[in-house]
Image (tube, helix red, strand yellow):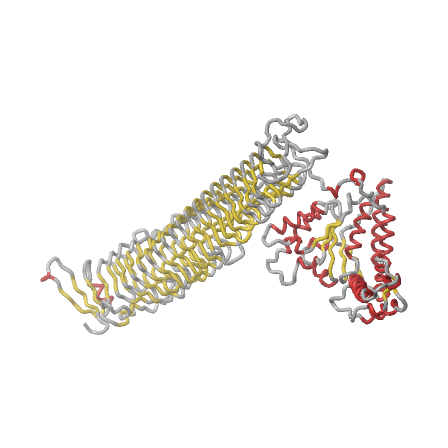
Amino acid sequence: MAQGTVQVTHGGSSRWRRRSGDYPTLTAALAVAGDGDVLSIAPGTYRENLVLHHAVTLRGPEGSLGSVRIAPLDGVALTVRASAVIQDLHLEGQDPTAPALLVEDGSPELTDLRVSTRSAAGIEVRGSGARPLVRRCTVENPAGIGIAVLDGGGGVFADCEVVAAGQAGVSVRGGGRPRLERCRIHHATGAGIAVTGDGSGLEALGCEVYEIKGAGVQIAARATAVLTDCAVHRTSADGVTLDTDAVLTLAGCDIHDIPENAVDLRSRSVLTLSRTSVRRFGRNGLSVWDPGTRVVADSCEIHDSTGDYPAVWISDGAGVSLDSCRVHDVPDALFVLDRGSRVDVVDSDISQVRNTAVSVSDGATAQLDDCRIREAATGAWFRDHGSGGTLANCTIDSVQTGVIVTKGADPTLERCTVASPAEAGFYVSAGGRGTFTACRVTGSAGFGFHVIDGCRTSLHRCHTERCARGGYEFAEDGPVAEDCTSDESGPRLAARSASGAGAGSGAGVAAAGERTGIRTVSAAPGPVAVGTAERVPAQRPADETDSGSTGQPAARGSVEVLGHLDALVGLDSVKREVRALTDMIEVGRRRQLAGLKAASVRRHLVFTGSPGTGKTTVARLYGEILASLGVLERGHLVEVSRVDLVGEHIGSTAIRTQEAFDRARGGVLFIDEAYALAPEDSGRDFGREAIDTLVKLMEDHREAVVVIVAGYTAEMDRFLTVNPGVASRFSRTITFGDYGPGELLRIVEQQAEEHEYLLGEKTSDALLTYFTDLPKGPAFGNGRTARQTFESMVERHAGRVAQLSEPSKDDLTLLYPADLPDL
């Protein structure tokens, strides 16, 4: 057969009736061919638009793929409208409005084709009568869609490959319903597989979608798809997306190496997963949004996040069910947000979570049954009002905090065990509630149950063992404890009758040999009853009791405290500022007594200046002044720094900040080097969480605590800009200047007088010279330096006097220039 010719072998019922003929063009050969005829095409390039109306066989030389090129200058290269057989051809198209290969009817068999084109689509199957069987075909179309199935078309694509596509690798729309078997789709743009439209569907078995500039699989607008034993990986956007009533089933699939969400669902879409792995994703493993959207997962694994986002994100009223699943090696595991959102988890493992395993907020609900949480910072956190759900028969092991309940959240926990928490087993604060029944805490490095802020929490038949700080800590009135026990060595607490009678041996007493271990002190001496459902009174620490009942000295008046302030060395401008504040507060109080409006006074302060300039001392005196004026209840000082407020994981920082704030109630919270909470290169630094928590607490409890933040001037200027609420809370800054040589000398003189030393002749002059010449670099400590200088002089004096056999009183008291330390 000559180059560029077509041999037509006409079929027949018997061998002798068959005949062959050669034709110069494919068009001419097809004109004489009928059903059953075989067209053997010689190698060459054919610039023809072919249309098959008969069930013919069209083939190139076997084993020589690419030697026959069907490459018209425009239009469709090959149109199939019959159940023909086409094999070993290379099809090319150049028309941006038409496909290279179009199947419009019949059940043709397309085998070993190579479609290399720059057209609208490589292969297009169109119409309800089109059901091709496409095997071992390759499509390369950098200008358009790889394979398009539309308008009711279908068919089977087996062992095919889309090696490049300028749009979707496989596009199904208009009611198309193809089946893909062991296909590979890669280097597409927009989506690897896109199925859209009511009635459209796709079934894929053993397929791989990868290297996609866009999403791997998109199902939208009431379309459906089933993917079995498929892999989706290395996309530039989400791995799998569902939108607007889409329905997708993933069975035995592997979705991995996705920079965004591995799976994203919205607008009433439904996803069913079984035996599927979701791993190495940059944002959420499952991102589920909107009312009616839901996910049902069975025996699946979500793990190895590469980003800083929760593995499963459920919001806006969506729902997720996990059964026999594993979630591990992620920053956060399950985040459920918004009223109507819900997660149901059964017989599943959540482990190796850097932050929170289960977070429930904004009115959402979580139901966990027979689950295991381990190696997490926080096991479960019910964050705010309306958030709740149930944890039943769950174990939480090797965490910082087992369960946190805050801000009005009200979960139910039944038969749950927290083992070896580094902080508390169960922690309730900030108005959280919760009901804990038959729950246990073992081996806690902190408390077993820690309930503060008067939270109305209920505990029934709970038990703690080996808790380092105690089994139960109830800091304020509110909790109900009934039949709770502990192996702690705390006081044995007797029962109280329901009528509120005194302690006795009534119903509800712990069994013999057990202790409740509940730390609480009643208002009157004697044991506190918790055996029945009585409210536990708040413990009032000894240092918070009234001086009249403890024998402690009565608090000093404002005149006395201001006198102490005036006695401090230097700080003239600071004294003026404090006196001005005091005068404003005092006059405001008197105006209120006279029935007049009082000017608003911002009591929270910023202290700026170098170390050792008296900031802490002035803060303590300021608290006493406010207490003497009735502005603060106690006026005590609680001094903290970054290390006291910032934890190692999300959640613990808020807890530490809340606890510090609670200790300062009625007094002053003094935060030294506050700028360290917001380092310049902060990234995910948890100091910002402390600042955000502090600002919220200052707003919610504005009358209860005065907050003073202190540090270097330039750094504090930056600190005031890190949160919009910071600058508004701290409207007054007091600058503490460095001490001059004369003021430093005066401090040494005060130290000497206090410790019964005297400065010898010329010692004062020597000290002035010493402090004048002393370098004033970053390490200069002002008043601290003066005190250290005095201590060094005392040490040198001791070394000198110790050599004397019978020192005189002057020898024992006089400090000389020789006792000064070296510069």
Residue closest to the eye, 389 or 507: 507
Quadrant, the N terminus? bottom left
**Seen from this angle, which residue lies furthest left?**
16
Do we see residue 382 in this rendering?
A: no
Q: Is residue 792 above or below residue 670?
A: below
The residue lying at 35 percent from left, 57 percent from top is: 207
Q: Total of numbered circles in the picture?
A: 0
Q: Is residue 333 above or below residue 529?
A: below
Do we see residue 425 in this rendering?
A: yes
**Seen from this angle, which residue lies furthest right?**
761
* 603 on left or right of 343: right
Residue closest to the eye, 362 or 483: 483
Q: Is residue 163 above or below residue 576?
A: below
* 810 on left or right of 54: right
**Seen from this angle, which residue lies furthest front?**
805
* 522 on left or right of 732: left
Residue closest to the eye, 733 or 43: 733
The residue lying at 72 percent from left, 42 percent from top is: 541
Q: Position of residue 561 (x, y in %)?
A: 85, 50
Quadrant, the C terminus? bottom right
Q: Position of residue 294 (x, y in %)?
A: 46, 45
Q: Quadrant of residue 15?
A: bottom left
Q: Position of residue 67 (x, y in %)?
A: 27, 71
Q: Position of residue 53 (x, y in %)?
A: 25, 58
The residue lying at 67 percent from left, 47 percent from top is: 659
Q: Quadrant of residue 388?
A: top right
Residue closest to the eye, 725 or 794: 794
